[in-house]
Image (cartoon, helix red, strand yellow):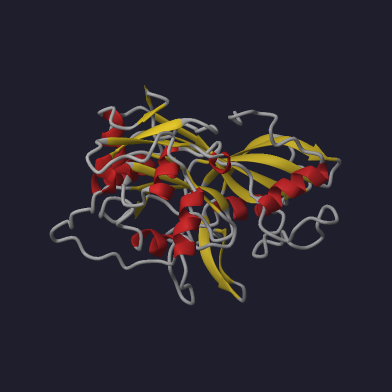
Amino acid sequence: MTEPAKPAASAGSKVETLRVQSSEADMRLDRWFRVHFPEVGYTYLQKLLRSGQVRVDSKRAQANDRLTTGMEVRVPAIVRQPKKPVPGLKAPMGVSKGDRDAIEKMIIFEDDHVLVLNKPFGLAVQGGTGTKKHIDGMLEGMADRFGGERPRLVHRIDRDTTGILLVAKTREAAARLGKTFQTRSAAKTYWALVKGVPKPPQGKIEAALVKASGPDGDRVRKARPGEQAEAMHATTHYSVIDQVARKAAWVSLKPVTGRQHQLRAHMHMIGHPIVGDNKYEGDINMPAENIDKKLHLHARRLIIPHPKTGGKIDVTAPLPDHMRRSWETLGFDAEMFGATDE
């Protein structure tokens, strides 16, 4: 429970000051507000911060500031007043509290226009045959959290790929970010664990892809002569970061294009499938014991122009648990690059 730093505010008080508890240490200010004042949306909180109505230790603060035990958060009394209904706003479809909490935990960057999630393993981005739970639906059910407008996916990653997923919070941001991806102005970096060690250690894979259904679902493969009309041009740059003898390698992958299964298919084509990939022979003859048979492909970093300001968004997602365990098993140092992986 959050305790007041000063005696409880009277009914006529304009502000109150709350002390940060030890259980809340290192919590971001915006997340602290979502815990204690869930009716205060992110956009509204930004207005309160810009106007200085919300302060930390009597100083102006930013939404992403980290709190420490004992800090005092100044909160205007207006945030406790009942929120007025927004005319014409549809009631949210709603998701469970567990799903809402799950989305909140995924957030690694947020402002008035953009949301960046660190997607976990096994969660679909969009719905499909037999897919009832997916991020797109979870976000739609949280329209109230994001100011009433439905968040829009800007791109997709596979169900079993982890890491960065970019979401637009407004229609305008979605349109601008979509054009950025179309013009290939977004720099994407993936980390993967592959079987064997690619030679040369740095290279470019250019292989057009076509869809090919199989017993394990949709796949893609290299286009054959006569299939040019339906083939999708695809280019991937790869670089070996570290390796274990000839058994496995940690590679950085930078796709120029964004085709379905592009990275997975390209690494399979050069004889080095991604570990744990059950569609492209990455789940057989594992490189070491105790390696999870889960896809070891992670959207690590994204650099993209901001849709409103034109400034640079540069965000990095930490490894998921199964890849972190594999890195420890194989002796790879995931922190060797610090905040970047260039």
Q: Specify the quadrant that holds the C terminus.
A: top right
Residue 307 in view in this figure: no
Taking 55 as reference, is 124 left or right? right
Q: Is residue 130 above or below residue 105?
A: below
Q: Is residue 69 above or below residue 196?
A: above
Taking 241 as reference, is 73 left or right? left
Query: Horizontal and vertical percent for residue 322?
Result: 70, 53
Q: Residue at x 63, y 28 (%)?
A: 338
Query: Horizontal and vertical percent for residue 107?
Result: 47, 46
Query: Horizontal and vertical percent for residue 149?
Result: 26, 54
Task: Name the residue furthest top.
Answer: 59
Residue 128 in view in this figure: yes
Taking 145 as reference, is 209 left or right? right
Task: Name the residue furthest left.
Answer: 87
The one of 255 and 78 positioned closer to us in this rendering: 78
Taking 341 as reference, is 322 left or right? right
Q: Residue at x 48, y 30 (%)?
A: 71
The one of 145 and 280 positioned closer to us in this rendering: 145
The one of 169 and 255 positioned closer to us in this rendering: 169
Residue 30, picture quadrant:
top left
Give the total of numbered labels: 0
Residue 10, picture quadrant:
top left
Residue 62, picture quadrant:
top left
Query: Horizontal and vertical percent for residue 176?
Result: 29, 41
